Image (tube, rainbow, N blue to C red):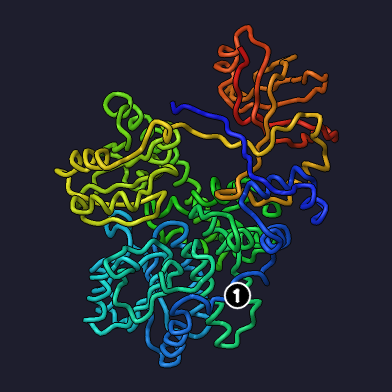
């Protein structure tokens, strides 16, 4: 397991002044400052931002040109094919564009690459199939920015190509290396003036539909009615919940309560969730994995068909199927993580960058397993598996390691690659696997310090300060997720008065704690109860990192804390 260090946030501001101005507590003001929200405009947007605070789609390079071309193609009845991607962002992007283009009267269909057969993005066969089908225009979403040769083929075959994407752009001697498309909408372009480039493919698609509806004089409300899918894509693609991403997710989650989408409602029902209380957590860890499971184990068309379903029986069947596929995926992932961990422990404990080769693992699970390795060892991790024609892999990184740049340095060993600082996908020949591992490790300038898992504490807050009103105020900070993490508090030297292991799997511990000043507090620790009791031994003091909540039971409401990390005081 990775070493762990508790760190206290020390960002400075006049917390009392902020608290007074925005009618919040100094504790909440400090947390907001810890999220790098600085200045009146940013604070106002963070606390009270609405859809009206979103940036204009027209600020995106090539947006107006793309809208103009799509309108013209729709008027001329020229067939447009959307080329999406098989993950949750790609599925939501495809859904948003398909609904948008249909609404303006375009002749439109879609194709989503098969993860195993096609791999990521637009390949040559997708292009040639489009030409054979008489397609006039290809419109990509959540892919296309690196498909230089494929787009050239499409143009040589007489098609118009429009790219919408959000992935990082390969840099050449003269700046961005862009595909030769008729228009490229990607806020990461160096020459794009969009103020917040860190948005997902689904939000780029959503912005395009906004501009399209505006140009076609379609009521804005119809665009707003698709907001939840931009929110689901943003959380599902693990975007930073900052700036307009946070507004999209905050407003989109509220809208799910009134969604008219049959498929989404059925998926919520199959997972025993309440549509009126869907959080970013539910998207990231319950609904999102179900939408992803189709693309992982069968076909992403299943998830898209669910969202497009207009028949209750059909929606019910597909939601059940996706739920079952996700349960199967969980079992396969568990087995893969065990195999990968054993390989690391036996052979690669000293490596700075973990490269694990699991030939028989389902290639769609490589990224999830890489993420679990990254969490366990606090090191960048790649998991490679046998694809149909080559070895394919996915990587997940740590803050100190820019994965996309690292792959650029070994690109001579790769057949194909793409991604972000924190995640990437690639393919390579089997005979290059060992050399890939060797060169990545040789190039990595990571130190032991980079492998220490740093847990950032927002406020060292004694239990005496916890109140129902503070807990309610903390809800202003939601939605929580990447870049807007749930706040954490800490207190040292707590005395354990009583302890009880709960749950049929004995995976929860209820503690009765008391501070030096005599303040009592119930606490829950979700961990292996027997292991916790064994570690504790005779000790009866804990230091804890926690989040305060209200426990409602039998009509009574009591303060309690959820312990996220603990140290046994010796």
Residue 509 locus on image (x, y percent): 65, 22
Q: Which residue is more in the foreground, 541 or 480?
A: 541
Residue extending farthest top: 538
Q: Quadrant of residue 250?
A: bottom right
Residue at image position (37%, 53%) is 298
Residue 265 locus on image (x, y percent): 61, 58
Residue at image position (54%, 60%) is 315
In this image, 437 relative to 381: left or right?
Answer: left
Residue extending farthest left: 431
Q: In the displayed structure, would residue 133 be above or below residue 337?
A: below
Residue 307 locus on image (x, y percent): 52, 63
Residue at image position (51%, 71%) is 194
Residue beneath label 1, please?
223
Q: In the displayed structure, would residue 292 be above or below residue 525?
A: below
Which SS class for mark 1? helix
Do we see residue 377 in this rendering?
yes
| Quadrant placement of the N terminus | top left
């Amino acid at each position: 397991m990775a070493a762990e260090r508790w760190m206290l946030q020390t960002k400075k501001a006049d917390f009392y002044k902020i608290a007074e101005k925005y009618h919040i507590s100094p504790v909440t003001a400090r947390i907001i400052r810890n999220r790098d929200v600085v200045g009146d405009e940013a604070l106002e947007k963070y606390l009270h931002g609405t859809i009206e605070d979103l940036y204009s789609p027209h600020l995106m390079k090539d947006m107006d040109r793309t809208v103009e071309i799509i309108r013209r193609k729709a008027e001329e009845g020229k067939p447009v094919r959307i080329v999406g991607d098989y993950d949750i962002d790609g599925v939501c992007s495809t859904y948003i564009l398909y609904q948008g283009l249909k609404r303006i009267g375009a002749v439109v269909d879609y194709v989503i690459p098969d993860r195993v057969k096609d791999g990521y993005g637009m390949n040559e066969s997708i292009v040639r199939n489009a030409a054979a089908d008489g397609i006039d225009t290809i419109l990509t979403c959540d892919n296309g920015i690196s498909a230089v040769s494929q787009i050239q083929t499409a143009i040589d075959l007489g098609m118009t190509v429009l790219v919408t994407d959000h992935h990082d752009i390969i840099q050449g001697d003269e700046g961005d290396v862009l595909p030769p498309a008729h228009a490229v909408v990607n806020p990461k372009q160096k020459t794009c003036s969009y103020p917040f480039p860190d948005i997902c493919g689904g939000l780029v698609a959503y912005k395009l539909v906004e501009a399209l509806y505006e140009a076609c004089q379609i009521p804005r409300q119809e665009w707003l009615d698709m907001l939840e899918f931009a929110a689901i894509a943003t959380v599902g693609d693990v975007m930073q919940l900052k700036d307009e991403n946070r507004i999209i997710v905050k407003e989109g989650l509220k809208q799910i309560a009134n969604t008219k989408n049959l498929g989404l409602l059925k998926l919520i029902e199959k997972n025993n969730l309440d549509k009126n209380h869907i959080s970013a957590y539910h998207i990231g860890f319950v609904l999102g994995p179900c939408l992803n499971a189709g693309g992982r184990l069968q076909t992403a068309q299943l998830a898209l068909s669910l969202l497009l379903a207009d028949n209750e029986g059909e929606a019910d069947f597909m939601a059940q199927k996706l739920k079952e596929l996700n349960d199967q995926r969980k079992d396969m992932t568990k087995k893969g993580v065990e195999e990968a961990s054993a390989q690391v422990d036996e052979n690669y404990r000293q490596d700075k960058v973990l490269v694990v080769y699991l030939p028989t693992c389902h290639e769609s699970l490589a990224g999830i397993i890489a993420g679990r390795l990254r969490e366990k060892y606090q090191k960048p991790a790649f998991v490679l598996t046998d694809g149909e024609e080559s070895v394919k892999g996915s990587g997940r990184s740590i803050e100190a390691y820019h994965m996309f740049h690292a792959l650029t340095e070994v690109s001579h060993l790769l057949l194909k690659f793409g991604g972000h600082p924190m995640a990437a996908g690639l393919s390579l020949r089997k005979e290059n696997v060992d050399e890939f591992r060797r060169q990545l490790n040789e190039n990595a300038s990571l130190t032991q310090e980079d492998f220490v898992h740093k847990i950032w504490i927002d406020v060292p807050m004694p239990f005496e300060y916890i109140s129902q009103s503070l807990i309610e105020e903390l809800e202003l900070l939601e939605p929580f997720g990447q870049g807007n993490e749930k706040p954490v508090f800490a207190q040292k030297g707590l005395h354990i008065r009583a302890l009880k292991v709960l749950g049929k799997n004995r995976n929860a511990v209820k503690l009765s704690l008391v501070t030096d000043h005599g303040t009592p507090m119930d606490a829950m620790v979700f961990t292996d109860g027997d292991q916790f009791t064994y570690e504790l031994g005779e000790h009866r003091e804990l230091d804890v990192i926690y989040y305060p909540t209200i426990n409602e039971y039998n009509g009574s409401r009591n303060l309690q804390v959820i312990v996220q990390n603990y140290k046994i005081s010796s």
